[in-house]
Image (spheres, helix red, strand yellow):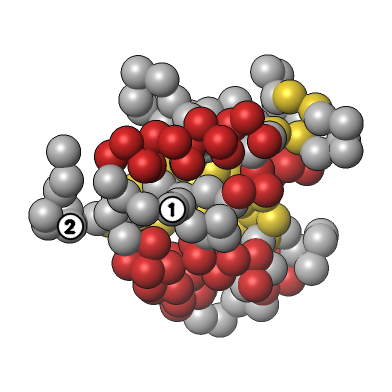
């Protein structure tokens, strides 16, 4: 079933001071389900808003974490059979060919965020011959095909 409207979305940002001048900032969000372009804009707004939360703080003093349902994925995060299944699913729904690159993940990576689960192999993750970790799907459907839930971080220790 095609959805004709875009639901309002939100992000919750919490900033904790863990030591004098040292902070952890966590943002939990659920991005738009219909438009990659909308998700890209939402991500830029979230990153911009989160930066204003600590205007006097140097980024070197803030561990930033953004997580949850991005409704977005990279083709490279899937193995060949997973991608083929996703393309077939999109075709049966009349959605066209899925985006191969996520604007959300690109925006966050361009801002210095790193994907936590790609840097720490998770239980259940599949490692292929090229040693790339492919995560188990997290989409809420009966037969999940893609990982749409993510945890990214921007650490003062990693630049």
Check disc 1 and report the residue beneath it: 97
Check disc 2 and report the residue beneath it: 6
* Viewer-proximal residue among 64 and 29: 29
Q: Quadrant of residue 100?
A: bottom right
Q: Quadrant of residue 156?
A: bottom right
Residue at 34%, 25% (x, y): give it. Answer: 141
> Which of disc 2 and disc 1 is earlier in sequence?
2
Residue at 65%, 65% (x, y): give it. Answer: 109
Q: Secondary structure at mark 2?
A: loop
Left or right, residue 90 beside residue 131? left
Left or right, residue 65 beside residue 94? right
Q: Find the distance from the CA under tag 1 to the CA under tag 2.
A: 20 Å
Residue at 48%, 57% (x, y): give it. Answer: 99
Left or right, residue 53 beside residue 82? left
Q: Quadrant of the N terminus?
A: top left
Categorize mark 2 by other alpha carbons within 10 Å: few (<14), some (14-19), many (20+): few
């Amino acid at each position: 079933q095609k959805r004709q409207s875009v639901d309002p979305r939100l992000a919750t940002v919490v900033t904790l001071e863990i030591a004098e001048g040292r902070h952890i900032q966590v943002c939990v969000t659920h991005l738009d389900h219909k438009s990659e372009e909308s998700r890209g804009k939402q991500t830029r707004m979230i990153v911009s808003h989160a930066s204003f939360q600590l205007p006097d703080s140097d980024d070197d003093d803030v561990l930033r974490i953004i997580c949850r349902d991005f409704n977005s994925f990279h083709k490279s995060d899937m193995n060949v059979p997973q991608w083929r299944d996703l393309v077939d699913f999109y075709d049966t729904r009349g959605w066209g060919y899925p985006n191969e690159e996520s604007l959300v993940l690109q925006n966050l990576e361009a801002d210095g965020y790193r994907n936590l689960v790609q840097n720490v192999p998770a239980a259940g993750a599949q490692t292929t011959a090229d040693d790339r970790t492919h995560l188990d799907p997290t989409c809420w459907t009966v037969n999940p095909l893609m990982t749409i839930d993510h945890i990214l971080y921007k650490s003062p220790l990693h630049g």
